[in-house]
Amino acid sequence: MNKIDEYIKKYDIVILIILGFLFYLPALFYGFVYDDVGFLLQNQYLNGSIQVHFFDFFKPNYIMKFIYNPLTFIVQWLIIKFFGSNSFSFHFINIVFYILSYIALFYLLKKILNNNYYIAFFSVILYILHPCHIECVAWIGAMGYNIASIFFFLSFLYFIIAFDENKKLNYIYSIVFYILAILSQPIAVTLPAILFLWIFCFRWNKFKESIIFIVSYLPFLFVYLFLYYQTILKTSRFEENLNYILLDKLSIWGFNLFNSFIPINLCPMQSLPKHLFIITLLVLFILVYIFRKNIYFIFFCCFGIICFLPYSNIFFNINIPVADRYLLLSSISSSVFISYLSIYFFEKFKNKYLIKYLSFFFFIILYLFSFSIYLPVWKDDRTLWRYAYNVNSDNLYIVAKYSLYLYDDGQYDTALVVLNNVIQKPQKKSLSWVYDAEYTIYKLKSKILMKKGMLDESLNVALKLKELKPKYYETYFYLFDVYMGKKDYDEAIKVFKIADEICKKDNLYKKSDIFLSFNNKKIILDFILSRPDEFIDSFKIISNDFKLLGDNGEFSKILEKKDYKNREEICLNYLRKYNTEYSRYVINLLVALYMQNVYKEKASHIMRSLLDDMDKAEDFIKKGDNKSLEEIYLSIISKNEYMYVAYKNLGVLYLQTNRQDKAKDIFMKMLKINPNDNEIRRFIIDYLEN
């Protein structure tokens, strides 16, 4: 046993590092999930599309809305800059951050526990295995939690060293690490309270002289909170209509306490079992009463509560969901408790082997079991939302996300079943994001019905959107799409005008995406109604205001020439030469151009043949003749590489017939034509990672 002790103490850091890499090795090959693509790859400030200066990262509400993590943004920007936008680099660096954090924690625990080596060592092992940490390590978007925890532990460690050894330089190190921690993630804001708790529990005789050191952290905390508040001020993070009752608030606490000790109900968006907090708090109260004379037990009990305070709704109503990542620091308490109790039983029941070894291995086995089930969930979006739906099928947000991926995979019937199941259940509309999810659900159902050719049913569902959000511009933009599908152009014009009035009244056209969406729909409407001159006006707006070609409106001058073949060549040259966010509007111009009767009359023989083939394809879709449909789309693409609609329809056909490899090839070709097609990019990312 002595040799084992010597071996562990000699190679403890190596053992801990190997454990971290061993358990999270599969995550290295996982993809981007949840909102990674939108927040990282499509963030123009992080992906290099817009040049940013160092101090830009520290501007509130600049790099990203409702999140203020400037140091994390800098790290993510550097990763993309030096390693590109591949998920492997992100996952590898995130795992390294996690390993560095628990190595720092190991040294910190040895210091706090007065060199009680095995409690500290076993606590860190439990910390590594804790299934609630999977969200922080396997999800790239939670990287900031690992970065913040590194500096949190280092700041705490250097404070203890400075206090005990009276070295003021270490106080400066501690404050610098604290600043880096809070700039990485708000989880670190509680450190001053933790330092005060440590003084209260272990250095009470030096309480007065410690106050000045703890107070020195507060100015930096207040500055950070001010900047953070400026970031979330204009978002829905704080909402007046969040009417949490006390039972709901305590349920959140109890749920997370339970998950911190026995993490068997893991989910990105958990349902909250009512009254669970009573059992959890009762067990915790019994443990605290038994070990009330143990100052370490009391310290870590308070430590866990303080660390979770920023993510609770006890003192104010804040729109923060329950999530495993919020337990990253709080789980230290449960790890120490379990470690302490295991070693306590191990020593107390030396001759009772069953009790002794059960106490030691029960939680390791439980954590390993939960870990093995939950880690693969984060492989990609489909596994994530499928798992979330199986765990919590009543959550509107989860249903909306899961159904979206069923829709993308062409599983329309399955998606309809999922949507109809949740629509039939009464929903609580106290949270705005729940209300938005209900809106998304009806919108998605209407889209699926359109895909299936059930236009009347699709319209009935789309009208529900009008009930949910009668003053929302997107409602009428979507009704416009439905009426265009039904070829009811009079109604399409009516709802289009309503959308236009709402956008002008609310000054929404200052947002480029809404402005472009409006003009894009107008382009299609003008073409179908044979209004080429009005179409040109719409496209000139895009060209002039957004400098489509960067040529100060030269493109608009060329478009004024009523030479349809010349317009076609202009668009094709643009796609060959430029890869910008406006490519999709040029593609829509081409599609609309090919559809117009005036163009058909003046089109070449080959183009007339292609347009006729597109009409035939519609007949094959109605007949369900997939073989003929595939052949005609391949023929169209071989004759004109820019027939984007043919590519898209063929890719969907391959997905519907379970030919993922061929679908991936088609999507790759589409992305070469239009690199800013976000829907296709999501397909490519998913299939490439798989």
Image (spheres, rainbow, N blue to C red):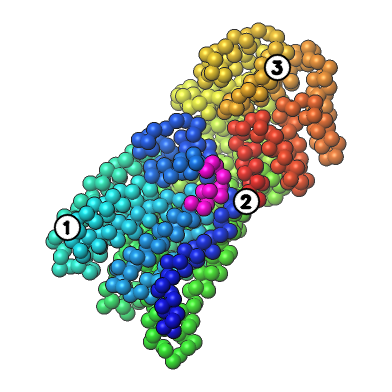
Q: Residue 683: in sight, yes or no?
A: yes
**SS under mark 3:** helix
Seen at 32% across and 40% down, the residue is 227
| Labels 3 and 1 touching (C-beta < 8 A) | no
Q: Which residue lies under the disc numbered 1? A: 211
Comparing labels 2 and 3, the label whose residue is closer to the camera: 3
Question: How many neighbours does mark 2 have within 10 angstroms: few (below 14), some (14-19), or many (20 or more)?
Answer: many
Q: State the SS at label 1.
A: helix
Q: Nearer the viewer, residue 222 or 112?
A: 112
Mark closer to the chain start, 2 or 3: 2
Residue of label 3: 568
Residue 193 percent location from the top left of the image? 26, 58
Q: Quadrant of residue 171?
A: bottom left
Which of the two labelled residues, at mark 2 and mark 1, occupies the earlier sequence position? 1
Instruction: State yes or no: residue 589 in magenta.
Output: no
Q: In this view, does 290 lie to the left or right of 434?
A: left
Name which of mark 3 and mark 1 comes first in the sequence.
1
Q: Which residue is drawn at 80% across and 26% down?
A: 639
Give the magenta-colored segment's residue range.
83-93
